[in-house]
Amino acid sequence: MQEIIRFEDMNLSDEIKHAVKDMGFDEATKIQAQSIPLILEGKDVIGHSQTGTGKTAAFSIPSIEKIDKDMLGKVQVLILCPTRELAIQACDEIKKFTKYLPKIKAVPIYGGQAIERQITALKNRPQIVVGTPGRVMDHMRRKTLKLDCLKAIILDEADEMLSMGFREDIETILKDVPEERQTILFSATMSKEIMDITKKFQKNPELIKITRQQITVPSIEQYYFEVPRGKKNEVLSRLLDVYNPTRSMVFCNTKKQVDELVEELNVRGYAASGLHGDMKQTERTRIMNAFRNAKIDILVATDVAARGIDIDDIDAVFNYDIPQDMEYYVHRIGRTGRIGKEGKAFTFVCGRQQIYQLRDIENFTKAKIVLKAIPSSTEVIETKSRKLISEIKKTIEKGSLEKYNKIIDELLEDYSSLDISTALIKLIFAKENSYEPTKSDDALFENEGNRIKAEKVKMSNAQKKRSVQAKRQQHNSSARKNVVRADESNMDKISINLGRRQKVSAAHILGAVAGESGLPGKSFGRIEILDTCTIVSVPHEHTKEILAAMKGCKIMGYKTITRKI
Ligand code: ADP
Ligand code: MG
């Protein structure tokens, strides 16, 4: 067991210690405790640990400490991040660390913001630049970003950068910066591609690996529910009412589903908003702020849209749709139970095939995901009543109710106090939440649990395999039937590098292209599955956006490349 290390006892300047204290950090996380001293020593480092373990501080704190005070006019640290959101977030955190170091400046540069503004910011002589690879290259080419005095380059979230297709850009940048620099790489997952980069560009790197056992956050309780088809909304409402999370996130696999669910939740009286990959930045920021300031209780998002969101104090994560990719599960539930806080993760499982998917996730994460019964309508009503009772008690105890006496007196002339109280409670329930659990679903929920359990026992492994295959074929043909209707005359063809060999089905492909692009499934044409790739007919006017949306998309856990043919 490694001992606990406090920032106070680390070899850091008083200014940094003071700032870290202001941020409420006391103990260093494992990845921080191990990487900060090595980076301070000047070593190249590979840091491998799960999302939410504090990697930003792990590389930012020592980088700030190493800035040469005699070269304050030069960029000395370059941090590459996969998205503008992550770049902004990392830069904001660095600004907090440099709170008591007024001469040290950090600037974020990313695509989507006017380049002139960034040129002005860069002229202001920052020592730290945090940016996305594309925009960094752009500035290097324009010579508005000069890296001749660079002392350290950091690849943050290297796995995300690679899966988003930034490999070439990263290599170009790494080749272009001074030989005599420190190269640091952080990632939540490791792959051969990442190791290739480290071999090519790092010098005797030290690998710091915080293993999954150590990092599975024990404070996340993980449950799943067997949900009958078409009943996800009912189940979600019941769980929201019974567990009553202050702040929660709900994950769906498609943008369309996000929209539909937000609408449904709003109708049911919940303060929910959706987050979309294709939303404008200002809109995203507005929604994120509303969520942060508790104006929204529930944020509904797709995996891509939720990338890089960093909000603590999320009590519960709901997997409304089971994640398409096992790694997404880890990312999703990592939103709750952040450092030292408790959290719950609920996954909806719909049908037998998804149970197998859930088992795969369990094997992959080495976590136990426990089956739980869907709360009954009685339980929901009881929880709500208890909440109301305690609120009424508190209000009575607080006193100062005299000013309402007149209303009560008037009512008492015609009605009993019991009648009046009952009517008031009805009013409160109606106002607070227009939704009531559907009693008739109770029997269905119980049956569903029993049915799936019975089937699970019956099926041998071989049977399991066959049934999954049969399902796939069924999917295949039904998806085809649905899509052939589209008019092929105005179509382009795109190819995705997954085919029969990867056991991909038309449903998978259609799910991915429709989900990522946000276009309805019926707008796609023929889906032709070949040995190693799949050809999809796509509406000509949307080809460009589909290709952009598919960049970095994973299907069945495979990283994909999509091209126009
Ligand atoms: P990662 O990059 O590993 O996903 P982040 O650097 O984004 O993780 O950190 C996750 C959250 O934990 C942030 O809100 C950060 O402020 C907080 N955090 C980081 N280090 C500590 C610490 N030592 N103590 C308390 N909170 C921390
Ligand atoms: Mg990070």
Image (spheres, rainbow, N blue to C red):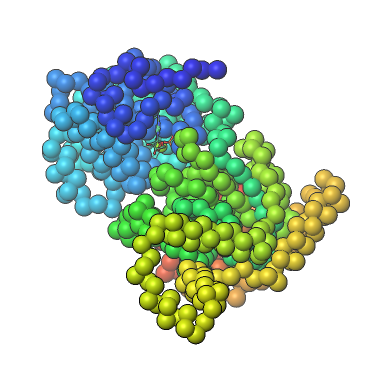
Residue nearest the observer in this picture, 8 or 128? 8
Across and down, in percent, residue 345 comes to 57, 47
Across and down, in percent, residue 495 comes to 53, 56
308 up-or-down from 29: above or below: below
Across and down, in percent, residue 561 comes to 50, 49
Left or right for 263, reference 83: right
Q: Residue furthest bottom?
A: 414
Residue found 68% across the figure and 45% down from its top: 370
Count of numbered circles on the image: 0
* Residue 19 seen anywhere in this rendered image of the structure: yes
* Residue 165 seen anywhere in this rendered image of the structure: no
149 up-or-down from 269: above or below: above
243 up-or-down from 427: above or below: above
Residue found 44% across the figure and 63% down from its top: 271
Res. 125 image quadrant: top left
Residue found 25% across the figure and 19% down from its top: 13
Across and down, in percent, residue 432 comes to 47, 68
Q: Quadrant of ligand 2?
A: top left
Residue found 46% across the figure and 20% down from its top: 4
The N terminus appears in which quarter of the rendering?
A: top right
